[in-house]
Image (tube, rainbow, N blue to C red):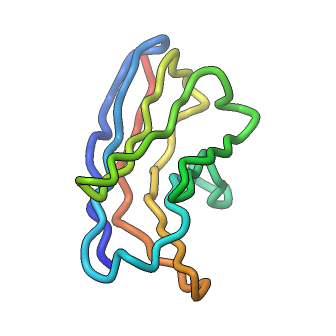
Amino acid sequence: VQLQASGGGLVQPGGSLRLSCAASGYIFSIVVMGWYRQAPGKQRDLVADITTDSSTNYADSVKGRFTISRDAAKNTVYLHMNNLKPEDTAVYYCNARLATMNSYWGQGTQVTVSS
């Protein structure tokens, strides 16, 4: 499984960004896709994930501000981020987990929230 992430950038507090993660390869075994983030000096934490039947899960810190969605036809998962805060600044990583429990990571994309 290969994951191609895109959409990061610099945004002012209160702004919005959309991250995309396109999956390719052996995608038929993917059961969950999600986004994690890692700020400097901190561990990588789950932001949100979505199952193949579109059940979603969010970190408490992003509930009500971020929305994860998927386009099955495009094998792509999106993370819509609204009302961004400086504490959202991190490298965001896309993840796919297979039915075998194998896990794959995309390259990180930097999100910086600053005035």
Q: Quadrant of residue 18?
A: top left
Going 71% across and 41% down the picture, which residue do you hit? Answer: 59
Task: State left or right for residue 15 relative to residue 89.
Answer: left
Q: Is residue 49 visible?
A: yes
Residue 29 on image: x %, y %: 45, 79
- The answer to whether one can see residue 36 in this image is no
Total numbered labels: 0
Q: Position of residue 75 (x, y in %)?
A: 30, 59
29 vs 49, left or right, is left
- Going by the picture, which residue comes out furthest to the front? 53
The residue depicted at 54 percent of the width and 69 percent of the height is 31
Report the residue at 54% width, 73% height from top: 97
Relative to the observer, which residue lies in front, 108 or 27? 27
Quarter where residue 36 is shown: bottom right
Residue depicted at 48% across the width and 65% down the height: 95
If the image is split into quadrants, where does the N terminus sit? bottom left
Q: Position of residue 7 (x, y in %)?
A: 27, 40
Figure check: 24 above or below 35? below
Q: Front-most of 97 and 29?
A: 29
- In the picture, which quadrant includes the C terminus? top left
